[in-house]
Image: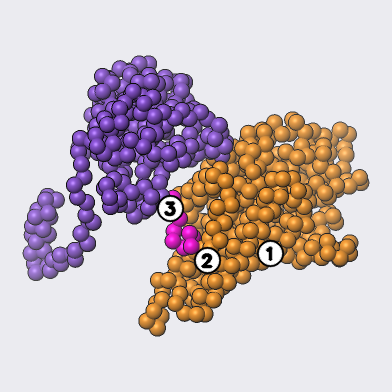
Chain colours: A orange, B purple
Amino acid sequence: MTPGVAMTSLDLLDLDSLHSDEERQIRDVVRRMVDERVRPFVAGWYEDGEAPVRELIKQFGSIGLLGMHLTGYGCAGASAVAYGLACLELEAADSGVRSMVSVQGSLAMYAIWRYGSEEQKRAWLPAMASGEAIGCFGLTEPDHGSDPASMATRARRDGDDWILSGGKMWITNAPVADVAVIWARDPEGIRGFVVPTDTPGFTAREIRHKMSLRASATGEIVLDDVRLPDSARLPEGRGLRAPLSCLTQARYGIVWGALGAARDCLSVALDYAVSREQFGRPIAGFQLTQAKLADMALELQKGYLLALHLGRRADAGSMTPEQVSVGKLNNVREAIAIARQCRTILGANGISGEYPILRHANNLESVLTYEGTSEIHQLVVGQKLTGLSAFS
Amino acid sequence: MNIVVLVKQVPDSGSERGLSADDKTVDRGSANNVINEMDEYAIEEALKIQEAHGGEVTVLTVGPQQAAESIRKALSMGPDKAMHVVDDALHGSCALATSKVLAAAIGRLSPDLVISGAESTDGRVQVIPHMIAERLGIAALTGARKLVVDGATLTVERQTDEGYEVVTAATPAVVSVWDTINEPRYPSFKGIMAAKKKPVETLSLADLGIAADEVGLSGASSAVVEAGKRPPRQGGTKVTDEGDGGVKLVEFLASEKFV
């Protein structure tokens, strides 16, 4: 696909030149698939509050998008930067579609890949990489969001088995998932379990009336004495560090993804400003509009450099959770500011579903708080700066 | 079954294209250069046959150095290897000369089947597959919308304006395909990463035993004398219905030879 005029001119600093051919090719394949399979339909999915998750996941699996940064077990083994570029292109269509891929690859698959037994990896990862099986990740609870250490979901031994009881909330992909990675507390601490969703006692209810991420399936999970064999336990997944390390992976994808939503907004606003005439000339010619466009383009490029820096560090194995907090805090905050500013350039059309801008802005409201709220990321950075923890 | 797929790098048909001012050949500098769209269908068809019948798929390209980029993209869809004929003397070659080079290269690969797109979006000549078949003395099944391989027998539904013809031939043969034949796959990430390591053999005209004066602008059998921009679009004709609107419409359509 030939990028539109707006998309090309947004790369003021020629940051494209910082990528390898392989990275650009992977990005171009995702962009093409998104252009052909997502963009023409996503406004409708959003309006209906229903996306064809299973069909999309299979299409994404066919090119190797699911768990693409993992190695072995049918995963593509691509670089962290390539994964970031994929997240950006997906979220340029819709944050909900990117969330679907993040949860599958960075949360559910990563948890099994990193903390699972050989048997669990063989059982689930190839099917999840191809999109045959959908995964979800249950950490957040109705009463425990930013403070997952206080979770109420319990795991208790019963002979050789484990019994899980409790509930999880705001779980992306839960209504359509085949497998759930569930985190629960036992007297020794937090443990992870791989739970097939057809296990008796496991139910997932779709959360309706969302005003954000409407093209994504979100669910509430109820665990009513779910009996599991010991082989369902993630043998290496102990303590809160395990789920938090998964979140670091997913947050890294968000650092890139949020830029996609922002780029799409700015690209649309730029095209609109050039063609929309008021007072006898294009509104892009007015100084106030140009100041908005220039400031947004600057933030987009700075955010991109930040994402790329983190990606190169991730590929070198030196990316730290605090650095990911810097990235998520900055890039989501700037992305939502860009979306809102673009909406002002479009005037009334800015709120219309005919344009993607308010959909992106509303989606970013979720992205702002999920996978660690902005405030929590400020506290992570604050702790790094001061050596003092504000939340323990 | 060993298959050679012909892949051509062309200027993106979605962007502004033109001929260079000095020698009136395709201006490759000003446009985004991509795989000829119809060739992606040829690659897909070759891969489907390979999946069903085994063998090896080789991409063959005649083109300048920069065509190597399109070869890598073609390989990322799944073919095993590639051959790239690159030689400065090829610049400006006509269809006859190009078919000579392609036939010589195919001769070195001795495939059971050659598949190409039915036309390229730059030249749109459509004759290269026929010329190759003639030079190699093998069958040409062109303009296919369906291809069935049964042992050494090929059956093709040949797309025509009115419908289709069913034609058969024994291998080896040349088949050219339209975009109705399949849905090309997306290159997978594994395919993209593996493409870097796939062998690409680069040959010159001398390697193929072809003299420089047999090809290129000087050896061309035809020459572009003049090229001009398409005239700007004219305003439409307004037909006012005064009770005879139907008749006027038909008269208009007849004058434009639509009916």
x and y percent of residue A210 in the render?
62, 62
Q: Earlier in the sequence, mark 3 or mark 2?
A: 3
Kindly indicate whether the residues beneath marks 2 and 1 are on one polypeptide chain. Answer: yes
Mark 3 or 2: the one toward you: 3
Please state the chain letter of the residue tagged with numbered disc 3 in the rendered image.
A
- Determine contact: label 3, label 1, CB under 8 Å: no
Please state the chain letter of the residue tagged with numbered disc 2 in the rendered image.
A
User: Which contiguous range is marked in magenta?
Assistant: A1-9
Query: Residue at horizontal 54%, vertical 44%?
Result: A21
Q: Amino acid at mark 3?
A: Thr
Give the residue at mark 3: A2
Cα distance in 3D space between marks 2 and 1: 17 Å
Front residue (pair B184, B58): B58
Q: Amino acid at mark 2?
A: Leu
Q: Say above or below: B179 vs B27.
A: above
Residue B165 falls in image quadrant: top left
Query: Residue at horizontal 29%, vertical 45%?
Result: B25
Q: Helix or strand or loop: what does disc 1 sit on?
A: helix
Give the residue at mark 1: A330
Residue A8, magenta (yes or no): yes
Give the residue at mark 2: A266
Cα distance in 3D space between marks 3 and 1: 30 Å
Q: Say above or below: B123 vs B133.
A: below
Seen in the image, is A42 located left or right of residue B168? right
Cα distance in 3D space between marks 3 and 2: 18 Å
Front residue (pair A97, A273): A273
Considering every residue shown, the one lying at the far right of the view is: A187
Query: Residue at horizontal 57%, vertical 56%?
Result: A15
Q: Amino acid at mark 1?
A: Asn
Seen in the image, is A124 located left or right of residue A158? left
x and y percent of residue A253 in the render?
66, 52
